[in-house]
Image (spheres, grey):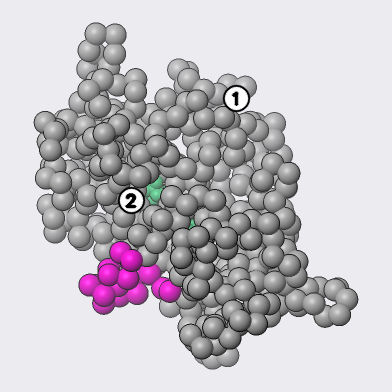
Amino acid sequence: MSDTKSVAVVGAGIFGLSLAVALREKGYDVAVFDRHPYDETQYDPVADENVQAASFRASYGTKLHYQRLALEGREAWIAINKASGDDLFVPSGMLRIQPSDELGALEKETLANMERDGIRQTQFVKSLPEDRKRAEAEGWGAKLLEFPIPDSKDARSFEAVLDSLGGFMRCSNACLYFHKLATSKGVKFIFGNEHGSVESIVEEAVGDKKKAVGVKTKDGVVHMANVVAVAGGSFTTQLIPDLSTHLESSGGSLATFKIDPENKALWDKYSPEKFPVTTWKSTPRNKTGKDTGSVYVLPRTPDGLVKIGFRGIKFTNFQPAPEGVPFTQDGKWSIPMSPKDSSTIPEAAVDSIRQFVKIFLPDFDQVPFYSTKLCWYTDSLDNSFVIDHVPTYTDNSLFVCTGGSGHGAKFLPVLGKHAADILENGDMATSFLRPFWRWRPDAPRRNGLEEGPDSPRNIGQAQFQ
Ligand SMILES: Cc1cc2nc3c(=O)[nH]c(=O)nc-3n(C[C@H](O)[C@H](O)[C@H](O)COP(=O)(O)OP(=O)(O)OC[C@H]3O[C@@H](n4cnc5c(N)ncnc54)[C@H](O)[C@@H]3O)c2cc1C
């Protein structure tokens, strides 16, 4: 271990918890700060007005490093399920429905990569007789669901691929599990809007550079630490404005239906045992490779909630940036909206979700949503995480662990190990993820981060019903 002894982690979400456990296992003194009183709410989604379930996929197209990490994560989830006696990861499978009755280009690439990696047998293509036969033999046959293509000639149905490695995580329960695990290992937690809310990073001048020496919380207390690691999700840029070149917040649209347990037919039909996580791209990727039409649904929760997400348009929320923010577009940056303002979703999202429901969840066609919500992504320039030291601070004193870009939750059990390796060893880290997660101001401005406030994605320009 290096000389570093104490780390102040800001954020007790997926990234912060994972990092805290891994650092503690390496022998660091770790204190985690979060403004949410998770010790009181126990990461309870009702108290937090959230539906915290996230899908798990092993398919990552050409991004084999994430496929590899997902498989590492899956193994860890299975072990955690055993150790906890709880289904924190539910291996319900994931059905990737194609835009038409044929396999899309990305899908073919994904299957080819899986073939090369020796895991093709975990995937079942609906139209391939040999795959169907294998699915039946292995108990997956009933999840190769048939969905007729509306208005198609010859009653054709959508092509689909069932990923038997896929499923979903119960995120709140998983965070609670990791919180308890961290506490049992000696990680300290400081929660709450006064004591746990970090207002600033405490700095010392070292020559013409600055060094992070701790954090100051809203109650005015300064907590000293050798390293400050910020894992603040979509709020991270507000604490470290240098990240504004790398990251942008955008809102994903969620809607739920609620099934009454008395309705045995629906309760059963949408259970994880019968219904896989189901995703659909209503349109193929456009010429630049951008996904403009994807919607997904998770099997019902034990509370009967069926969660549907639309990620075809990730809505930005451009607001005037404070002075000194190094990267802005027309003096603005996109930051999360308040929870109060995030409870309704734009018409474009409602329309896409309704179209999806009509085709794939006809039982809910005329049913009003039980809830809607915008949930804030932390998008990076290339959808890869940003986990590295901040170069404008000396002595590797400030570290960031963020940039989840809508796919971080599945990595909770394994992300921290790689992040802690990078925190401790920088360029000497042995993690295969080091090159992908580095601080990368040279990365081209893509992934929607080039669009700025004039984009139709800006929620200020969106229509609401
Ligand atoms: C709509 C949507 C759908 C998604 N679906 C999936 C999916 O299907 N599969 C998947 O794997 N991933 C999914 N994700 C991504 C996943 O949820 C994120 O990658 C993950 O939650 C990011 O974790 P985090 O720790 O960075 O942020 P968070 O979990 O948001 O945690 C950040 C924490 O930092 C705290 N914080 C911030 N600033 C401060 C401060 N100044 N002081 C104190 N505390 C602070 C916050 O209170 C919060 O608790 C989805 C994300 C969204 C938005």
**Quadrant position of the N terminus in the picture:** top left
**Quadrant position of the C terminus in the picture:** bottom right
Residue 415 is labelled as 2
Asked if residue 230 lies left or right of residue 29, the reply is right
Q: Which residue is mark 1?
A: 329
Which stretch is magenta? 75-91
Total residue callouts: 2
* Residue type for callout 2: Leu
* Residue 86 sits in quarter: bottom left
Residue 86 lies in the magenta stretch: yes
Residue 412, placed above or below residue 159: above
Measured from the top left, where is residue 240 in percent x and y?
38, 29
Q: Secondary structure at mark 1?
A: loop
* Residue 333 sits in quarter: top right
* Residue 193 sits in quarter: top left
Asked if residue 404 lies left or right of residue 37, the reply is right
Spot the residue most to the right.
Answer: 153
Observer able to see residue 104: yes
Asked if residue 76 lies left or right of residue 299, the reply is left
Please tell me which residue is depicted at 39% across the width and 55% down the height of the picture.
Answer: 69
Distance from label 2 to label 1 (Cα)? Answer: 32 Å
Measured from the top left, where is residue 328 in percent x and y?
55, 24
* Residue type for callout 1: Gln
Spot the residue most to the top.
Answer: 207
Q: Report the front residue among 453 and 388.
A: 388
Disc 2: CA contacts within 10 A as few (<14), some (14-19) or many (>=20): many
